[in-house]
Image (tube, coloured by chain):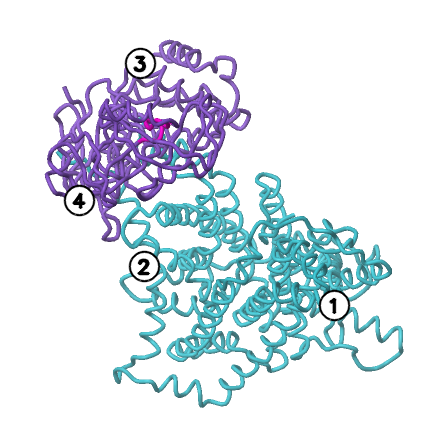
């Protein structure tokens, strides 16, 4: 059952729509990321959810009750939500345990219960020994954990996170992704997570909602978003993508603009003879040097292109090639490091139709 | 079910109060100067610009202000440069003493200088006569040059504060870059340093010019005995019997327009792009070695500070402690009677001291509260049009105290709001006049507090007012204490608005000092002046000690 239900949500600033006709259902205990480039309206959506902003149209319901609409706004303090902010927003004039205790003050609990809850949460986020420190005496990662503990201790119905990791350095960011997922599995709180980092969204989320210029373009599980992007924007924003353009024949093949015909998979994204784009992920393309292997792949209904290696970059765990196709254009290909091909070498690039995904332009 | 924001009335109320405070007196001035029993006419403006006496006052004001501006910029920027960019010794002490001249009310400085350089009994003139055997006075302070000299002494700290900030932000890298490209020291100074500092210099000139345009006390004390009127003293004279309120109002308008115009020019200069690079993060600064110039520079600095601080303070202290101030302070001449007379015997002082501190505390408290609410509204953009409130909060910057007083006098002597005759009209005047300093303090305080800190509190269950109390107020505390203190110090030294608005029961210390001057009660004036100075310094030192804030806004 959907606990959060966003319908036809719209918010404009100075005439420009920051959030435009957005629909989204979020289930109980689900972790959903709002993913998109900066300025796409994802933070606005989150602040609409929190009640800091009032929508111009549409509504937000939680458990069936309207909490936001153009005519009604339940203030943030009455929504039973928690939020984690980009700046952590840990209060500098309170100690760690005072920060964590803050939200419990409004819950009519006994001193004993409060202490117990604080102790438990601080242990969960590994901050027990820092409880009497002031935020200025903590590292960025520790401050982030204080923010997490403060948000979780009140056992909110919904947890909102606004790019919580963007102020951390790269190593810490990776560590905190797992930490956030671990805490989610432990507490099972319905969570909406805003980020522009696709790896972060993949690592933490049950489902990802990709947002572009205020509109929701695709919602799905991380694998779905990555392997079956519906639009060119999703394909290019989530991971790297080679995009080939042509027109759809209606029989599972696409006539590319350079005349080549390739077999594709199409989830109903496009009708016959429409202009389409085809997304090929670099790591889904095989490179083979000899004719025999290429012919064998073609027999297995792979699309096979002739080409020349133009450039290769060695990354240690992978090699990144730029292949000049003999028909037209170039392909980015990522392979295992044990296969080493030199620049200038004639090769075949092969991609299975399952990995050639038709997307809307 | 609709949940409305229960705190909204607080914000809207504060905003309306501010707009009312600013518009009501200004509207009164324009109304009175433009309408009379014959309806709308410009006859009073015609008189302002044709009456010889008025034209003379305008001319005097212009001459005085230009000189004060020029002298202040010269002294202020030299001092600022010496203190920030060279290896001059005792910088901390010099800064503290410049701050002391900043805090000294100009009317008190002017009074001290009548004792120092009055033509007959002035201490410096007597010294000169004793040393040279001459008959005449070396220096007559009751003159145009005397007036300019004293006003410049108490205006240069404004320029100093401004230039010192800029000098500290021009990094040596900028100058090094020019030298590496082949410019010598002189060319570097002329092509890099000076152009970078130029907007601040022009702006400092305007600031000092404005200051002397709106001063009342010093010109009244030094100019009037010499028959010299300025615009402010002329407006005051129009209030004396028989009062010509309509003329005072009409005479206020050119002054108001002049200050508005100058502030607009200053804003343009400071808003220019070239200046913002100076405002960036300052790089490393190396101090210039003064070498042999060190001693003369130090002498110059202390000469200036003697004129603005040491000599006036010395003569005030001497006057306070002696039976006859003009005689040497010997054991026979020593007395504490001035203190007991001032505090326990002289009729007006007890009430005036009580009124002054009551008004100071009241205005500072209400003013800080209002400024805090307004700054919060503009900073968090609580409702449509919130940013226009900044304009209203800063508007008194362009309203000279005496002009404000003319407006308030007209506005609050007739129903529906009759405040004249009570201390409440002074309260309204001070509240209005001190709003800019309180607002800018509160504004910069809120700017430094990330809004998310408050959002975090709200999500966890506290409403907006509770979040303000629990989160924002503790974080803003030192900034708001500073706002309170600056308003307090501003109020207890205020003369130019009080002089038109006081009534027998609502005298304040500055007004009593002004009155006592007529009676020649030098000892009592000195005692009251010292009291004002001591309280001001105590408050300012407390703020610096509490929050590390500097009354002049300079960095250490």
Taking the image as drawn, is residue B245 in sight? Answer: yes
Residue that badge 1 annotates:
B186
Q: Tell me, what hue is chain A? A: purple
Any magenta on residue A285?
yes
Residue that badge 4 annotates:
A275
Residue that badge 3 annotates:
A187
The CA distance from mark 4 to mark 3 is: 47 Å
Residue that badge 2 annotates:
B20
- Choose top left, top right, bottom left or bottom right for residue A199: top left
Q: Which residues are magenta?
A: A281-288
> In this picture, is B322 found above or below A149?
below
B303 left or right, relative to B343: right
The CA distance from mark 4 to mark 1 is: 69 Å
Q: Residues within 10 Å of mark 1 (few under 14, many from 20)?
A: few
A97 left or right, relative to A260: right
| Chain identifier, cyan in the render | B
Element under disc 3:
helix
Image point 60% across, 47% down: which residue? B540
Element under disc 1:
helix
Residues at discs 4 and 1 both on one chain: no
Tell me the subunit letter for badge 3.
Answer: A
């Amino acid at each position: 059952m959907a606990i959060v239900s966003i319908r036809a949500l719209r918010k404009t600033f100075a005439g420009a729509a920051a959030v435009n006709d957005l629909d989204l259902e979020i289930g109980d205990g689900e972790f959903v990321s709002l993913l998109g480039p900066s300025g796409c309206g994802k933070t606005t959506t989150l602040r609409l959810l929190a009640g800091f902003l009032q929508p111009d149209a549409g509504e937000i319901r939680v458990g069936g009750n309207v909490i936001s609409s153009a005519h009604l706004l339940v203030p943030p303090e009455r929504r039973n939500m928690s939020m984690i902010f980009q700046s952590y927003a840990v209060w500098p004039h309170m100690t760690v345990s005072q920060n964590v205790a803050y939200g419990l003050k409004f819950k009519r609990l006994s001193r004993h219960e409060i202490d117990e809850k604080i102790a438990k949460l601080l242990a969960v986020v590994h901050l027990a020994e820092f409880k009497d420190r002031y935020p200025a005496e903590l590292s960025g990662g520790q401050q982030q954990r204080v923010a997490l503990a403060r948000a979780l201790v009140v056992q909110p119905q919904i947890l909102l996170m606004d790019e919580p990791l963007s102020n951390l350095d790269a190593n810490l960011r990776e560590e905190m992704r797992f930490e956030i997922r671990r805490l989610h599995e432990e507490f099972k709180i319905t969570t909406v997570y805003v980020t522009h980092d696709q790896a972060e969204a993949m690592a933490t989320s049950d489902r990802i909602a990709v947002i572009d210029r205020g509109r929701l373009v695709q919602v799905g599980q991380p694998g779905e978003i990555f392997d079956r992007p519906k639009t060119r924007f999703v394909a290019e924003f989530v991971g790297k993508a080679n995009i080939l353009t042509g027109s759809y024949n209606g029989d599972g093949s696409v006539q590319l603009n350079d005349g080549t015909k390739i077999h594709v998979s199409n989830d109903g994204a496009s009708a016959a003879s429409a202009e389409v784009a085809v997304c090929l992920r670099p790591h889904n393309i095989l490179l083979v040097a000899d004719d025999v292997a290429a012919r064998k792949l073609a027999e297995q209904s792979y699309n096979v292109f002739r080409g020349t290696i133009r450039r290769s970059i060695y990354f240690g765990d992978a090699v990144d090639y730029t292949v000049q196709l003999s028909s037209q254009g170039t392909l980015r290909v990522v392979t295992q490091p044990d296969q080493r091909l030199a620049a200038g070498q004639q090769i075949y690039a092969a991609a299975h139709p399952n990995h050639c995904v038709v997307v809307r332009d | 079910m609709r949940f409305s924001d229960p705190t909204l009335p607080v914000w809207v109320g504060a905003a309306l109060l501010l707009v009312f405070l600013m518009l009501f007196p200004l509207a009164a001035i324009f109304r009175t100067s433009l309408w009379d029993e014959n309806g709308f006419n410009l006859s009073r403006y015609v008189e302002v610009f044709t009456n010889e006496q008025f034209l003379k006052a305008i001319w005097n004001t212009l001459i005085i202000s230009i000189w004060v501006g020029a002298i202040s910029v010269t002294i202020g920027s030299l001092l600022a440069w010496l203190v920030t960019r060279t290896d001059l010794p005792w910088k901390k002490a010099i800064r503290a003493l410049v701050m002391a001249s900043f805090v000294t009310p100009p009317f008190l400085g002017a009074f001290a200088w009548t004792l120092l350089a009055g033509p007959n009994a002035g201490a410096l003139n007597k010294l000169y006569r004793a040393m040279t055997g001459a008959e005449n006075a070396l220096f007559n302070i009751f003159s145009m040059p005397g007036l300019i000299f004293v006003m410049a002494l108490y205006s240069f700290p404004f320029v100093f504060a401004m230039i010192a900030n800029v000098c500290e932000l021009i990094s040596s890298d900028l100058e090094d870059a020019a030298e590496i490209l082949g410019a010598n020291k002189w060319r570097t100074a002329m092509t890099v340093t000076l152009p970078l500092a130029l907007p601040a210099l022009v702006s400092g000139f305007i600031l000092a010019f404005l200051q002397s345009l709106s001063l009342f006390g010093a010109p009244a004390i030094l100019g009037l005995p010499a028959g010299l009127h300025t615009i402010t003293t002329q407006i005051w004279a129009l209030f004396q019997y028989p009062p010509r309120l309509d003329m005072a109002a009409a005479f206020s308008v050119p002054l108001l327009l002049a200050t508005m115009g100058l502030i607009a020019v200053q804003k343009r200069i400071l808003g220019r792009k070239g200046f913002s690079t100076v405002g960036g993060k300052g790089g490393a600064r190396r101090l210039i070695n003064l070498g042999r110039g060190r001693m003369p520079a130090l002498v110059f600095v202390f000469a200036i500070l003697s004129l603005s601080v040491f000599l006036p303070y010395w003569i005030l202290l001497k006057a306070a402690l002696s039976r006859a101030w003009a005689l040497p302070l010997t054991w026979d001449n020593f007395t504490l009677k001035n203190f007991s007379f001032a505090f326990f015997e002289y009729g007006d002082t007890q009430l005036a001291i009580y009124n002054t501190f009551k008004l100071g505390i009241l205005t500072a408290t209400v003013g800080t509260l209002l400024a805090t609410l307004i700054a919060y509204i503009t900073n968090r953009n609580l409702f449509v049009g919130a940013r226009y409130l900044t304009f209203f909060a800063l508007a008194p910057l362009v309203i000279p105290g005496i002009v404000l007083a003319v407006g308030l006098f007209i506005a609050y002597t007739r129903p529906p709001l009759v405040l004249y005759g009570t201390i409440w009209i002074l309260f309204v005047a001070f509240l209005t006049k001190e709003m800019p300093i309180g607002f800018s303090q509160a504004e910069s305080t809120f700017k430094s507090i990330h809004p998310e800190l408050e959002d975090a509190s709200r999500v966890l269950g506290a409403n907006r007012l509770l979040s303000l109390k629990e989160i924002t107020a503790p974080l803003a505390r030192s900034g708001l204490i500073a706002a309170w203190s600056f308003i307090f110090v501003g109020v207890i030294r205020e003369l130019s608005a009080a002089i038109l608005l006081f009534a027998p029961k609502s005298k304040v210390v500055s007004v009593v000092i002004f009155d006592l001057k007529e009676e020649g009660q030098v000892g009592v004036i000195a005692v009251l002046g010292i009291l004002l100075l001591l309280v001001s310094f105590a408050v300012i030192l407390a703020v610096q000690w509490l929050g590390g804030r500097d009354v002049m806004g300079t960095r250490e």
